[in-house]
């Protein structure tokens, strides 16, 4: 493993949410590295800080303290505008809520083309046809989100996030809306995406997703705990 394989890392990240007079501490001094070719899972009980950490890694939020690095660029040192541009070009993100992932007026195929264009591609979607196939939604290319179930929308969201081959692919509870069969497809796709060279980072409670992790980061009350 060389430093070039480290697509994503964070160092000593702490974050609190301001709530009235008593800030809620969500993360304390968390460091991690996620490599290309690997599935890294953020695990831990509800409220342990998984989503907060994923949002910070994905340049959606800035931590109170600590730094985040994407392919050698310290994103926490960038202006909001430059951080957003880097996020669009280099990071695919799947939100937990299907409603946050897709645009109602675009078909599945149009999402894939848009994802590829956002990442500077030619709009053909890179390897997204194979990803749609692997996720069992290739035959829905002409459909809009309202014509898909919540689980199908999340699988399309994963293909949209992977379109244009961003080096970093982040997914917040990607199996939360899915039954066992669909979870199996998503788990297979996560592995395939890692094999294609993405650094894949997911939050989960799901043992089936945990089972395909190359590395598990355990969070408890916002702190990283070493595995026994
Ligand atoms: N917008 C917010 N405002 C205030 N507190 C928040 C906010 N978002 C999260 N928190 C708090 O920060 C802590 C970490 O929340 P986070 O959503 O990151 O945990 P999680 O491990 O992803 O939980 P879950 O598995 O339930 O999604 C929790 O105590 C939560 O209540």
Image (cartoon, helix red, strand yellow):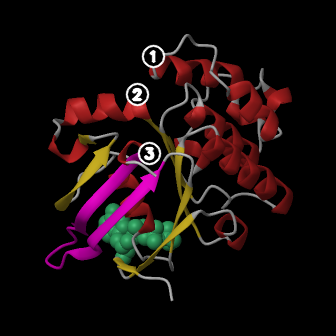
Q: Which residue is drawn at 38% across and 49% down?
A: 8
Q: For numbered disc 3, what is the local secondary structure?
A: helix
The image quadrant of residue 82 is: top left
Q: Mark 2 points at which residue?
A: 89
Report the predominant secondary structure element of the magenta stretch.
strand
**Tag nearer the camera, 2 or 3:** 3
Is the residue marked 3 within 8 Å of ligand 1, measured from its CB? no
For the residues labelled 2 and 3, the Cα–Cα distance comes to 18 Å
Marks 1/2 in contact by CB < 8 Å: the verdict is yes
Q: Which residue is drawn at 38% across and 53% down?
A: 55
Q: Quadrant of ligand 1?
A: bottom left
For the residues labelled 3 and 1, the Cα–Cα distance comes to 22 Å
Q: Mark 1 points at which residue?
A: 120
Say whether residue 135 is left or right of residue 190.
right
- Chain part drawn in magenta: 6-35
Q: Residue at x 13, y 77 (%)?
A: 21
Residue 5: mark: 3
Residue 82 vertical placement versus 194 (above, below): above
Q: Earlier in the sequence, mark 2 or mark 3?
A: 3
Callout 1: 10 Å neighbours few (<14), some, many (20+)? Answer: some
Q: For numbered disc 1, what is the local secondary structure?
A: loop
Callout 2: 10 Å neighbours few (<14), some, many (20+)? Answer: many
Q: For numbered disc 2, what is the local secondary structure?
A: helix
Q: Residue at x 77, y 45 (%)?
A: 149
């Amino acid at each position: 493993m060389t430093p070039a394989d480290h697509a994503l890392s964070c160092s000593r990240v702490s974050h609190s949410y301001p709530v009235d007079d008593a800030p809620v501490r969500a993360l304390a001094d968390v460091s991690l590295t996620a490599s290309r070719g690997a599935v890294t899972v953020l695990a831990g009980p509800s409220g342990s800080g998984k989503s907060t950490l994923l949002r910070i890694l994905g340049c959606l939020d800035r931590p109170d303290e600590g730094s985040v690095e994407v392919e050698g660029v310290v994103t926490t040192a960038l202006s909001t505008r430059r951080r957003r541009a880097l996020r669009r070009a280099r990071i695919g993100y799947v939100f937990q809520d299907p409603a946050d992932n897709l645009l109602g007026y675009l078909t599945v195929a149009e999402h894939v083309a848009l994802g590829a264009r956002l990442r500077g591609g030619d709009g053909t979607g890179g390897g997204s046809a194979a990803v749609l196939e692997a996720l069992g939604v290739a035959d829905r290319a002409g459909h809009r989100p309202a014509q898909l179930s919540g689980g199908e929308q999340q699988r399309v969201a994963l293909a949209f996030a992977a379109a244009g081959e961003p080096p970093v692919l982040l997914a917040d509870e990607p199996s939360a809306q899915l039954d066992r069969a669909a979870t199996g497809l998503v788990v297979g796709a996560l592995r395939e995406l890692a094999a294609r060279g993405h650094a894949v980072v997911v939050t989960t409670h799901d043992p089936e997703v945990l089972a395909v992790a190359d590395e598990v980061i355990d969070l408890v009350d916002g702190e990283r705990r070493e595995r026994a």
